[in-house]
Amino acid sequence: MQYPRRLTITAMQWHRVRDLDEVAPLDDADIRCMTELRDVLARHGRLERFALQLVHKHFELGPHEVLVETSDAATREHRLCVQPRDRLATLDAVPTAWLLGADGPAVVCVCANRGGEGHRGRHESD
């Protein structure tokens, strides 16, 4: 897949992402912020295109690695695994998670979409 020029693929640890157990619980300020973000998405007609995710990590990624999500509708399994970033072209990967930094959006997770089956079939990398 060809990515827009403004899009960078980066490993999450370069953004000082905290481990899940170090992330503060949701609070009223978070709810107010999410409400404002919802309003912006609504103004741009993007409510059904984007959602929010708590930024966290479970382990370190190397500078040449990226998280790849795969799904199996038959077994109702969804998983993330680490792949070398240079394999993305062979996976027909679609960006699915971004960090919004000062330099613009940075892709931190992609979905492998192999075999033309999309999310309806198993599309893991070999």
Image (tube, rainbow, N blue to C red):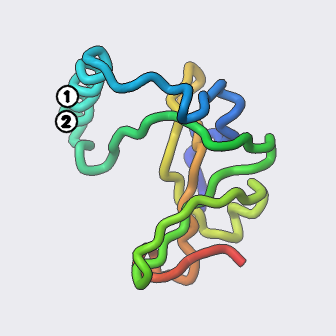
72 displayed left or right of 37: right
**Where is residue 15 drawn, in percent x and y?**
65, 27
* Left or right side of 102 for 40: left
Q: Secondary structure at mark 1?
A: helix
User: x%, y% of residue 61?
Assistant: 74, 43
Q: Quadrant of residue 56?
A: top right
Q: Quadrant of the N terminus?
A: bottom right
Q: Mark yes or no: residue 98 visible.
A: yes
Task: Give me the residue at 24% from left, 19% from top.
Answer: 32
Name the amino acid type tagged 1: Asp
Q: Residues within 10 Å of mark 1 (few under 14, many from 20)?
A: some
Q: Amino acid at mark 2?
A: Ala
Q: Quadrant of the C terminus?
A: bottom right
The location of residue 53, given as percent across then percent down, is 41, 40
Residue 39's disc number: 1
Classify mark 2: residues with Cα within 10 Å, few (<14), some (14-19) or many (20+).
Answer: few
Q: Is residue 31 above or below residue 79?
A: above
Q: Residue at coordinates 44% horizontally, 81% vertically from top-left?
A: 75
Placement of 14 over or under 97, stated as above or below: above
The extreme front residue here reads 21
Residue at 19 percent of width and 32 percent of height: 43
Whether residues under marks 2 and 1 lie with C-beta atoms below 8 angstroms apart, the answer is yes
**Residue under label 2:** 42
